[in-house]
Image (cartoon, helix red, strand yellow):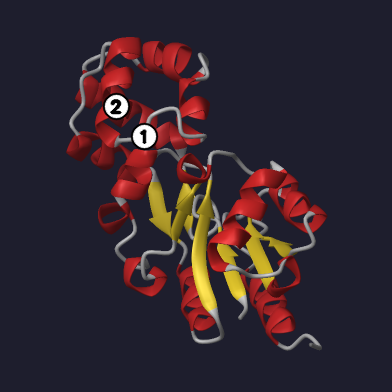
Amino acid sequence: MDVYFFDCDKTLYDYDFHKRLPKLAELGGVSQYRLASTWWAGGFERAAEIGEYSTSEEYLAAFAEVTGAHLSLEEWQEARKAAMTPIPGSIAALKEAAGLGTVSLLSNNPIPFKDSLPVLTPEIVDVLQDNDLVSAVLGARKPERRIYTRALGRFGVDPADAILFDDSAANVEGARACGMHAHQLIKHEDGTFDIDGLLDALHAFAARPR
């Protein structure tokens, strides 16, 4: 069985934190500076991405305590979705990969992201079929070795039979260091993505000698 792992942010969906932060500030009634200087600069989001908060409720309660911004999950989703734009070519590649093997997300994100996928990523949830691995569940972030070995273990697949598509060079190198195949999705200066390169890597992996 081949497994095709896709990152989410800047791989399947373009992501702009500078659109998310103002919306969070608006909905939470606090300044962008307060949010950035407490939650993000304080390392709380990173902690959330490795499983510090096991439920969305715990995450939002901690977010309120640290920042003073009391958000519902629906408001958190609204701000997150404001920063996300589907990348049609990447989503088409995901759908093609689903016809070749098993597809799964492998994304550095907290529990509310996983819980919100039907709202945030309606274009792909049916394709993924609940293969929605996020770092908060796996207890490690890319490019740590543990996240790759744990993700592979979820599917019982050898590293040589898995490939990661990711925008981060460090994440790609981390996957390769574990014996996986990997491809870095490049964003050009004009804002377009190198979908041809992604497809070439996908097809080469599918056609590799066994």
Classify 10 Å Cα crowding around label 2: few (below 14), some (14-19), many (20 and above): some
- Residue 167 visible (yes or no): no
Quarter of the view holding residue 209: bottom right
Alpha carbon of mark 1 to alpha carbon of mark 2: how far? 7 Å
Against 58, residue 74 (above or below) is below
Residue 163 position by quadrant: bottom right
Element assignment for label 2 = helix
| Residue at image point 38% right, 28% down | 21
**Image quadrant containing the C terminus:** bottom right
Residue drawn at (46%, 70%) of the image? 91
Measuring from the top left, give residue 161's x and y in whole percent.
70, 74
Amino acid at the residue labelled 1? Ser
- Evaluate if marks 1 and 2 touch, with contact meaning CB atoms under 8 Å apart: yes
Say which of 62 and 166 sits in front.
62
The residue closer to the viewer here, 100 or 157, is 157
Residue 58 marker: 2
Count of numbered circles on the image: 2
What x and y, as percent, mark residue 171?
69, 48
Q: Which residue is at 47% across, 63% downward?
A: 87
Q: Quadrant of residue 61?
A: top left
Residue indicated by mark 1: 54
